[in-house]
Amino acid sequence: MSHLQVFDRLLEISLLLQDDMARSFAGSGLTAARTHLMWELAALGPSPQQALAAALKVSPRNVTGLVDALVQGGFVTREPHPTDRRATLVTLTERGATTVRDMARDRERLARDLVADLDQARLEQLGQGLDAVAARLHGLLATGAPAGGAAP
Amino acid sequence: MSHLQVFDRLLEISLLLQDDMARSFAGSGLTAARTHLMWELAALGPSPQQALAAALKVSPRNVTGLVDALVQGGFVTREPHPTDRRATLVTLTERGATTVRDMARDRERLARDLVADLDQARLEQLGQGLDAVAARLHGLLATGAPAGGAAP
DNA sequence: TATTGTTATACTCTATAACTATA
DNA sequence: TATAGTTATAGAGTATAACAATA
């Protein structure tokens, strides 16, 4: 097993996970970006758009559009901020909260299914290998210079 | 090490690789989609746009736009097809070919760097674990139903 | 004066549908 | 009649810059 084969597998898995995610949005009015916002919102609790922009590492203008779409879909509402009248608190609706719970459940199930063929020892080995790769990647990116784009 | 931790690591690595890729395009006029097209083009040789659309699993209309941008950047040219006057052969320029070679070199180096901390046995264990995950993922997606979106 | 969210503008990726030129 | 590529149109994500209301 060569380093290139391992790398190819990582890219392959990455693409397959993205495909699966995109497929799961079909017809729901949700997208990766909107789902990500809801996910962060569930973690943060009701938040002004600035906080969401920071959490998502995205421009405030971008958040406006995402929230617009989620409001239209009935997943979130804009509530007045209790003390700052410039801000609005983006808040999950019942439907939005249910959606996030369902996603968390599906995610848990998928995570379990993916390693269903591995016994405890092999799971541990896989985890340690991934830890090492993630650590190297963080190190390489921390230098500022790109580590050298992974063309798929 | 739990299945959820392993899953989180996979998602984390996936995001970091995308970040790195995006960063490596800064100022070059290239993007992930355009780079992907060049990458396929290098593998296929001079190709009509239909072939590229099929290889990239993207609409022919989309290819028109990507090729337009790559022509403008001097990475590819549109040559007349020798026998079919409806078609054009998209062809890498000298600059385009050099770019792909550089990408392949960077990719090789990155693949090596990522596993630099692993000895041969651990590399093998990681590879086998990833193989198992990829196999499960293929199996789950083959059923048609989404395996349950991996919300980041 | 600084911050929150918005309007204005622009670029990219993506898709479908209709159209032109050729097979 | 079918195919290759284009124009037309549209939706989504993203960004910067200018502007309003409020701190």
Image (cartoon, coloured by chain):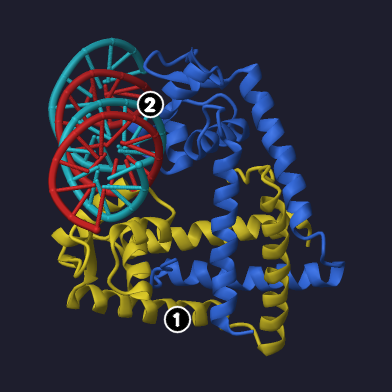
Chain colours: A blue, B yellow, C red, D cyan
Q: Position of residue B21 (x, y in %)?
A: 39, 63
In the figure, D4 relative to A96: above or below?
Answer: below
Q: The C terminus of chain A appears in which quarter of the rendering?
A: bottom left
Task: Give x and y (percent) for residue B74.
Answer: 15, 66
Quarter-wise, where is residue C4 in the image?
top left
Q: Position of residue A75 (x, y in %)?
A: 56, 21
- Residue closer to the observer: B91 or A118: B91
Relative height, residue D19 to residue B142 (above, below):
above
Would residue A58 be found to the left or right of residue B114 on screen? left
Horizontal placement of B17 versus C1: left or right?
A: right
Q: Residue at x 38, y 82 (%)?
A: B105
Answer yes or no: are tags 2 and 1 on the same subunit. Answer: no
Q: Is residue A92 visible?
A: yes
Q: Does residue B31 appear in the picture of this structure?
A: no
Judged from the image, the secondary structure of the residue bearing numbered disc 2 is helix
Between marks 2 and 1, how big is the CA–CA gap? 40 Å
Q: The N terminus of chain A appears in which quarter of the rendering?
A: bottom right
Provide the residue designation for mark 2. A64
Residue beneath label 1, please? B108
**Image position, residue B54 (x, y; %):** 41, 57
Q: Residue at coordinates 62% horizontally, 31% vertically from top-left?
A: A42
Whether residue A8 is situated above or below residue B18 in the rendered picture: below
The structure residue drawn at horizontal position 56% and vertical position 64%, both measured from the top left corner, is A12
- Identity of the amino acid at label 1? Glu
Q: Tell me the subunit letter for badge 2.
A: A
Please give the name of the residue rendered at 30% of the width and 62% of the height, measured from the top-left corner.
Answer: B25
Mark 1 packing: few (<14 Cα in 10 Å), some, or many (20+)? some
Of B151 and A132, nearer the camera is B151
Residue count near mark 2 (Cα–Cα under 10 Å), binned few <14, some 14–19, many ≥20: some
Q: Chain of mark 1?
A: B
Mark sitting on residue A14: none
Q: Please tell me in which quadrant of the rendered image residue B136 appears.
A: bottom right
